[in-house]
Image (tube, rainbow, N blue to C red):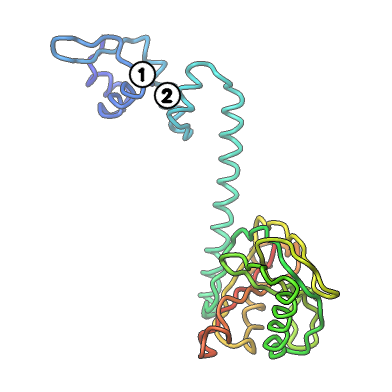
Amino acid sequence: MYQIGEFSKINRITVKTLRYYDRVGLLKPAFVNDDNGYRYYTSEQLPIIHKIIALRQMDFSINEILDLLKGENDNIIFENKKEKILNDIQEKKKQLTQITHYLEKNREGFKMSYEVLLKELPEVIVYAKRMMIPNYDYYFEAVPKIGKEISEVNPGLKCAKPNYCFTIYLDGEYKEKDFKVEICEAVTSFGKETDEIKFKKINKVDNAACVFHKGSYDKIGEAYAHLFKWIEDNNYIASNKPRESYIDGIWNKENVSDWLTEIQVPL
C-alpha cells in the first residue's frame, strides 16, 4: 500500500487533488487509518488513476468521468466530447481570423473606427411596410406616419422591450437614394393589418455580423463598406438582406453626433 504522499509522487498529481477525488467519489483510498486518518492506496488503483488523469487531460468533467468509470454510455460520452471540441476549434478559428484581420488593418495604417461583433438576432413579431425611399431624410417623415397609422387600428398594440425598430434593405446593398426597404417595428403580438402595413414573424438569426455607426446617416455608407469588407475577409457569406436597427436618433437625441445605428447582416 502507498501512503497518499507516495501515491501523489508516483502519479505526479497533488495530494490536494487526491483528497478532492476522494470527496467527490472519483477515487477513494483503499484504506483509511481510523486512528490518524491517513489515506492509503494500492497498486491495483494505479491503472484507475492513470485513466482519470488521461480523461482530465482530454477535458472530461468529473461527472463525465464518474459515468465513464461506471461504464455508462462510453461511446455517447466520447462522441459528445468530440463534437464539443470540434465546435471549440471552429470558434477559436473564428477568433483567430478576427484577430488576424485586425492586425493586418493596423499594419496597413487603417484606423479601426468600426468594431464588428458576431451575435444572434432574436425571433420577433413585427408590423412592416414595404416602400421605396428617396433618401435617408425621408425616414423622419415615413416612420412616424407608419406608427400613427397602425396605432389608429390597434390602440392597445405594444412595442417589444427592448425596442427593436429596424429597416431591411431589399436591394441587398447600401444605396444613398431610391432604395427599396421594409420598415419594421417589433411588437408583442399580432394585430389588425391595413392595406399596406402587415404583421409577420421574422425567424431568429443564429449568426449576424453587426457594427455600430455613431452620428448622422450621411456617413453610414462607411460602416457598410467596412462591414462587408470584414465579412469577405473573414470568409463569411451574407445569407439575407442587411438590417439597420435604430437605437438613438432624432426622437431622443438633440445632437446628431449622438445618433446610434446598428447595421446587422445575417450570415
For marks 2 and 1 on the same chain, the one whose residue lies earlier in the sequence? 1
Locate the N terminus by quadrant. Answer: top left
Mark 1 packing: few (<14 Cα in 10 Å), some, or many (20+)? some
- Classify 178 as above or below 11: below
Mark 2, secondary structure of its residue: helix
Q: Amino acid at mark 1?
A: Leu
> Image point 51% across, 90% down: which residue?
254
At mark 1, the secondary structure is: loop
Residue 168 location, x and y as percent? 73, 72
Dot in front, 2 or 1: 1
Residue at left offset 58%, top offset 87%: 250
Front-lying residue, 123 or 108: 123
Contact check, label 2 and label 1, Cβ < 8 Å:
yes
Q: How many marks?
A: 2
Q: Which quadrant holds residue 116? A: bottom right
Q: Position of residue 230 (x, y in %)?
A: 63, 70
Q: Which residue is mark 2?
A: 52
Which residue was labeled with disc 1?
A: 27
Q: Nearer the viewer, residue 111 or 36?
A: 36
The quadrant in which the C terminus is found is bottom right
Q: Is residue 56 visible?
A: yes
Residue 46 in the image: state x and y as whole percent.
37, 15
**Quarter-wise, where is residue 196 in the image?**
bottom right
